[in-house]
Image (cartoon, grey):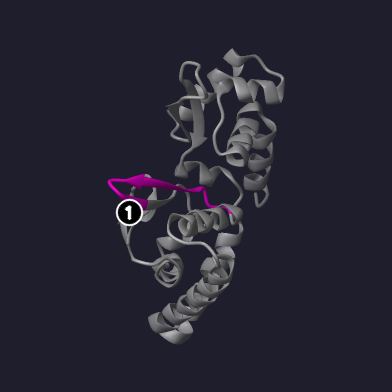
Amino acid sequence: MLMSHEMQDARFFESTRGKIVSALRRRHAASAVDLASEFGLSTNAVRQQLLFLERDGYVVERSVRRGPTKPTLEYSLTARADALFPQHYDRMLNAVLREVRASFGNDGVKTVFEKLGKRAAAKMQRRLQGREGRARVEELAASLRENGVDADVVERDGRVELREHNCPYASTVGEHPEVCSVIHHVLEQTIPGSASQVESLATGGDACRFEITK
């Protein structure tokens, strides 16, 4: 039946487990107590649903310190959880790119994403005016979050690292890897120094990680 998938999506997000997934996507991270308070449920009921989600690979936990109290367990979605959300746009995008490739070859697809990358970089340059160093990377991460990418910035061994924990185009990248070139264009044009990708979601990594050196 054509509507079976859509019906499954709707029913899932009406369930407690689906509501927790939606809340984690909105909040990026939350504790069982946070979620219990939001939905008016017991903490144990929420923890049980989180255990199921963690078992299935949709949620990961980490210990964080909130002030002087003992560490709190916070939960966030994994890249795999993207598949739980309706992604009908990817079918159209794949179809369009197949037509471009069939009509203009691989170079045609490459040219499309080069132009998109240059346009995105020019737009980001205007947004980054007046910012230097890590502040530029932080602003780029903020822009990515506004566009559905769970992105953050960390510093390791004196190097700033931009991390993308999910990809809105995950189901497209496998067939059309040129999609990834957009972020590379943006980094090359807007972030001073050298940015090298050290991990990729597309090849089984936990995140897309870009090390940035001055």
Q: Is residue 209 left or right of residue 125?
A: left
- Residue lying at 54% horizontally and 18% vertically, measured from the top left: 48
Tell whether 73 sits left or right of 40.
Answer: left
What is the total number of numbered labels drawn onto the structure image? Answer: 1
**Which is more toward the observer, 111 or 14?**
111
Residue 156 falls within the magenta-colored stretch: yes
Image position of 153 (left or right of 204): right
Q: Which x, y percent locates residue 98?
A: 48, 74
Which percent across, then down, holds residue 132? 47, 61
Callout 1 amino acid: Thr
Residue highlighted by disc 1: 203
Comparing 111 with 16, the one in front is 111
Q: Quarter-wise, where is residue 174 in the image?
A: bottom left
Residue 13 in the image, given as x and y percentages of width and height: 66, 36
| Identity of the residue drawn at 63% across and 35% down | 23
- Above or below, comparing residue 198 to residue 20 in the picture: below
Q: Give the structural element (helix, strand or loop) at label 1.
A: helix
Q: Which residues are magenta?
A: 148-160
* Few, some or many residues within 10 Å of mark 1 (<14, 14–19, 20+): few
- Horizontal and vertical percent for residue 63? 43, 25
| Residue 176, image quadrant | bottom left
Quarter of the image with the C terminus in it: bottom left
Q: Which image quadrant is residue 46 in?
A: top right
